Image (cartoon, rainbow, N blue to C red):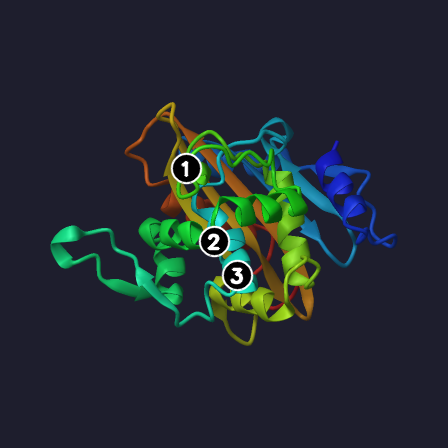
Amino acid sequence: MIRNIILTFLATGIFISSCTYNKAKINDGLKKYFDSAHIEGSFSMMNNQSGEISLYNMKLDTQRVLPGSTFDILNTLIAIQTGKVVDEKTTMPGNGKLDEGNKEITLKEAFEHSATPYFQEMARRIGQDTMKFWVDSLQYGNKNISGAVDSFWLTNRLMISPDEQLGLMFRLYFDKLPFQKYAQEIVRNLMLKEDNTLFKLSYKAAWNVDESGQSIGWVVGYIEENRHVYFFVTLLKSADREKDLKEIGLKITKNILAGMGFFKGQK
């Protein structure tokens, strides 16, 4: 049912026996959030304390699609691990506008705005062989990085499913990825969007169009309340290329979290 998460955890030796991953709770009540936006999508959440997984649209949750700019997470981890990036202040050409000299921006700015040219330059500096080593090592999605090293995550080559993304968020949060803790800490800081006395909300949102012309939207992350962490993944798909799936995805995700009782510091 959620076999990809289970296999990922077992393969990396971090399966937590106190959690029960063998049964997901199907929550069709979440359908209304997607219907109100006239969009197809899925949502999954794992309560780390209980191990319970709440899931809407299992068919889509196990379907692999392009990661788009959510791959910025792994791209950044690899770049820091291999010394191509030092920290969030590292600059590279990042706006892709030749009339402005393709000015340099920081990793923090690039991550916040999903500046594709920045991460393409990052991937070129990492190189095909090194990139393949790390993608294979993490068993990231279908592991296909064929084609140009600076675009495989934006086409229909590299693909990943929501349940695999959920496993990645789990490992990133607990420093369980095979990268220096320093690298994982930087990425977690880049993902932190809201931090107050009631909760901490961290995520990476993305909106990209695949080679078939279909829009793909992602929101991957986690929310912390009362020292408890909940991991979540929202996936959106649409044939309408004009829909801003990044904004729609964020709205749906936050509405779902609010409907579940988050943002009050009571979870």
Secondary structure type for disc 3: strand
Q: Does residue 113 appear anywhere in the picture?
A: yes
Could you tell me if the residues under marks 1 and 2 are in contact, i.e. CB atoms within 8 Å?
Answer: no
Q: Distance between the residues labelled 1 and 3?
A: 30 Å
For image coordinates 69% across by 65% down, the residue present is: 228
Give the residue at the far left of this rendering.
Answer: 99
Question: Residue 2: in sight, yes or no?
Answer: no
Q: Mark 3 points at which residue?
A: 202
- Between 158 and 19, the one lying in front of the other is 158
How many neighbours does mark 2 have within 10 angstroms: few (below 14), some (14-19), or many (20 or more)? many
Q: Distance between the Cα atoms at labels 1 and 2? A: 13 Å
Residue 95 image point, x, y percent: 25, 55
Residue 81: mark: none
**SS at badge 2:** helix
Locate residue 38: give its quadrant: top left
Query: Is label 1 in contact with label 3 (beta carbons under 8 Å)?
Result: no
Q: Which mark is residue 148?
A: 1
Camera-side residue of 179 and 60: 179
Q: Which residue is at a point 57% across and 36% down the rendered structure image? A: 160
- The disc, 2 or 3, on the residue closer to the chain's N-terminal end is 2
What x and y, as percent, mark residue 264?
Answer: 57, 66
Residue 126, labelled with which disc?
Answer: 2
Which residue sits at x=47%, y=67%?
194
Amino acid type at image mark 2: Ile
Tell me if mark 3 has few (under 14), some (14-19) or many (20+) residues whose alpha carbon lies within 10 angstroms of its own: many
Residue at 47 percent across and 49 percent down: it is: 127
Image coordinates of residue 142 in percent, x first then y, are: 60, 33
